[in-house]
Amino acid sequence: MSHATAEKADTAAKPVAHKKKVALSEGKRAERKLGWLLCAPAAITMLAVTGWPILYSILLSMQRFDLKFPDRTEWIWFDNYVTVLSSPYWWDAVWVTVLLTVFTVAIELVLGMALALIMHRALVGRGIVRTTSLIPYGIVTVVAAFSWRFAWTPGTGYLAEALGGDPVLTEKIPALLVVGLAEIWKTTPFMALLLMAGLALVPDDLLKAAAMDGASAWQRFIKITVPIMKPAILVALLFRTLDAFRIFDNLFVLTAGSQGTSSVSMLTYNNLIKGLNLGIGSTMSVLIFLMVALIAFIFIKLFGTAAPGSNDGGKR
Amino acid sequence: MAGIGGAETTGKKVGWGVLNTVVVIYALIPVLWIASLSFKSPATLADGNFIPREWSLENYKNIFATSEFTRALINSIGIAIIATVIAVVFGTMAAYAIARLDFPGKNLLVGVSLLIAMFPQVSLVSPLFEIERGLGLFDTWPGLILPYITFALPLAIYTLSAFFREIPWELEKAAKMDGATPGQAFRRVIAPLAAPGVFTTAILVFIFCWNDFLFAISLTSTEQSRTVPVALSFFTGSSQFEDPAGRSRRQPWSSRSRSSSSCCSSSAGSSPA
Amino acid sequence: MGATRRYRLAVGAGAALLAATTLTACGSGGQGITVNVYKYNQENFQAIVDGCNAKAGGRYKIVYNKLPREADGQREQMVRRLAAEDDSMDVLALDVTWTAELAKAGWIKEFTGSVKSQVESGTLKTPLDTATYEGKLYGAPDNTNVQLLWYRSDLVPTPPKTWDEMISMAEALVAQGQPGLIVGQGKQYEGLVVLFNTLVNSNGGTILDENGTKAIVDDKAVQALAALKKLATSKAIDPSFSNSTEDPARLLMESGKAAFQLNWPYVYASAQKKPDFAKNFKWAPYPTVSGEAAKVTVGGINYAVSNYTTHPDESFDAVLCLRGAESQKLAALKDGVPPTIKSVYDEPEMVEAYPMKDDIIKTLETASVRPRTPAYQNVSTVISTILSPPANIDPQATADRLREELQNALDSKGVLP
């Protein structure tokens, strides 16, 4: 991620950077100090709370460390990684997770954008639309998941009855579809909210001018709205993907991993918390972290200058 | 923003009405199902009917029978509000610096905060527990507020800096040139533009705190700081095997109604028009 | 006006509280020993605690700390704190399957001397077995549980004696278009392990060896797998079986779609809320697999004393009271958990609340214990994963896979599913 931003600094902000090195003016020095001061509270809080726990997890991942067999603890470098990466359970879970992430995030982006446009542009009843469409996000996940399980179980739920009484949660693909649906329903408002705030920054006069020049609604959307919204889209996609990749609650309640629907987070939970195998569990955490970091890196590369922290940024 | 497409005809209004209805139905049907379950009597809970055959307030009576749920509600709201305010203030400061100022270490901060958001929280819980126990923060409000701020900050910083960069800051300069004081320029020009971003962030952070289960279950042990999602996992049916079906079912709904009202009043405030 | 009155009331209450605390402080001789009990949320447990506090006469005060409803959640909390050598936990309510793990880790104290003999006297044998590891007693049985066969007497005049009979009766009902489903626990979780353990033991098979260090899964266990598959692929099985837990099973039967249910006795109490359903809702001993009485998996809760407690004597004393006959009776009547002390079943009030008590006691006499090993969580996770969904079991191949992966789990090798 720092590559992306460094590169940008190279291309666009070269003259500035150059000047800075030669002589730090009074103003520059004040700007530096102000920047550090403003960031200090956030940086200190984050480091104080997570610094040691993250380091500790990484250290654990290189040890044989099973709370049930404390006398067998030893330093084994990357053996845990070999064990996890050669386990079929791990790869099954990775595929389930990737599939769920790709589909849910893609659909959420489309739906979220539509919802954001409706919330932003609605001529009538805007307040009602905004209020109600955010409700799903505010419901405690576990509660929503229980109600979905009820709804989809033949005999106790309206959805199962409506679809002919098939027990959808007892087969892998239908069960994953149900889990995906529950995720999409719950988190689309997250996307929509971020995108709507992005929409608020698109100047109306620009759109009006384009309309007068004969641009169609679709052209205005693609050529004007989307480019200006790029940073908002990036943030929405990035954080939604990070969360989707770590899906746990919905799966746990809806299937608990039955029918091969386990996700990487559930596998980590089983090894770390249930199995008390801190070594293997921490290894899985680090691997999830690396995969998520890779996804984030790709997104930031794709979005280029829209990434936060790049100096030229989207200022226009 | 009225009038992008010209006149507001009745046809357009009807069109919007239809669209709105679709959205409302999509969002609310599952919610109504939860509400419906909450009003069902234990005998008809499992009948699969979308509308209760027998309306009953028994479930609601049960949750409010003891102070457990009310107390959890107070904890949840209090903790979430404090964490949201602090996270948004810290986040705004950092995001302003990232969007507007040039200083070494900026990219590091942006990168590190993203990394923190990416690390699976389930493996951070045990070390955090030991730290908090050592510091006497275990089972206190600050013991939850601190991790919430921490894990909300990356999202806050990213969201806010994305918005701050899009704000046409030249307007501020222009206003000052027109004779406005810096304070006036900020209040009249910048604040209205920044508000949607700040409100959005606040809502997202609030809901993040509100929904969290992992930290809340691991870092609390009594009613003193137990939050709603955790309290739900403590409710029992008349035996250990009974699902929260019986009781906790309707807690959800009363809790939801509260969270939605808090999220929506602020979103209404953020409306840019 | 109203406000002032309320204010006065508050002041009055505050003064009373203050007086009360000073008084109790005097009574306890200024010691103020607190015994912290950690137990899942049992509705009427506070009454039991209050009763024991009164009996303690100020020597110590028991404080009830609630744990979550789900067993995994309870264990997670306790293990995290025990691993951190937390001395604020004194008495722990443990699921019967956790004894070996916590004992082996040195997290709970052995019961010895007079405390041990007091726990043992009058207590049913199978529950005591669950609290024993490597010949030592680590827990005091609080409540116990065994599944029975529940059936609809309007559809089934005489309950089936054997597993195969149950399946064929149910299939016959379904073929006639009657509500003949069999409901039970087939989701990937502990309930599936309970079912599997019952079938294996009833058939005389073995999952792990006596020491819990070697995976056996013998031929008798293969036959048990075949019996499980037969149920799961029967035309009469609940279509949601592979995603079903205790409560959905109960609800489906109460909604009138099933004729047979394999479940714990708690279903009796909830059935009584629906008189129409309850009048035909009957029970019978669990169907046999081998011809002899079924060896049904025992469940329940034992009290253990944390190794890090600073008040061991008071804690053991508190345990004796919390699981005493009086407390067990209260829990049995108010919270619906079967007692572990035999004499409690003879109390007159038990007849109405537990009409099935004779069948419970009889089933308990032949009941089986789940594998005793410190790695039980691993064993359970492996079993439930490999058996899920039960319809896909291929008896011999599944048994071979079980044997291999169970051995890995026991040795803490490899990845848990």
Image (tube, helix red, strand yellow):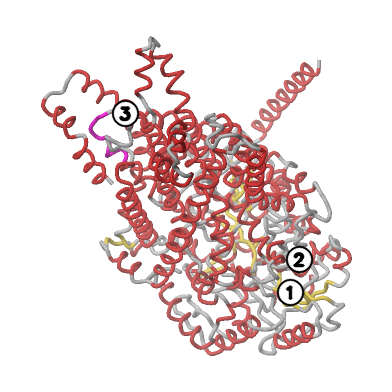
Residue situated furthest left in the rendering: A22
Mark 1 element type:
strand
Q: What residue is disc 3 on?
A: B100
Asked if marks 2 and 1 touch (Cβ < 8 Å), the reply is yes
Quadrant showing the C terminus of chain B: top right
Q: Which residues are magenta?
A: B102-110
The amino acid type found where label 2 is placed reads Val
Task: Give the class, few, some or many, for how many residues have Cα within 10 Å of label 3's Cα (few <14, many ≥20).
Answer: some
Both on one chain, marks 3 and 2?
no
Residue B12 x %, y % = 63, 41
Residue C312 vs B176, above or below: the answer is below
Residue B86 x %, y % = 46, 30
Q: What residue is rendered at 53% in x and 90% in y?
A: C219
Mark on residue C261?
A: 1
**Cα gap from disc 2 to disc 1, whole angstroms:** 10 Å
The amino acid type found where label 1 is placed reads Gln
Camera-nearest residue between A183 and B180: B180
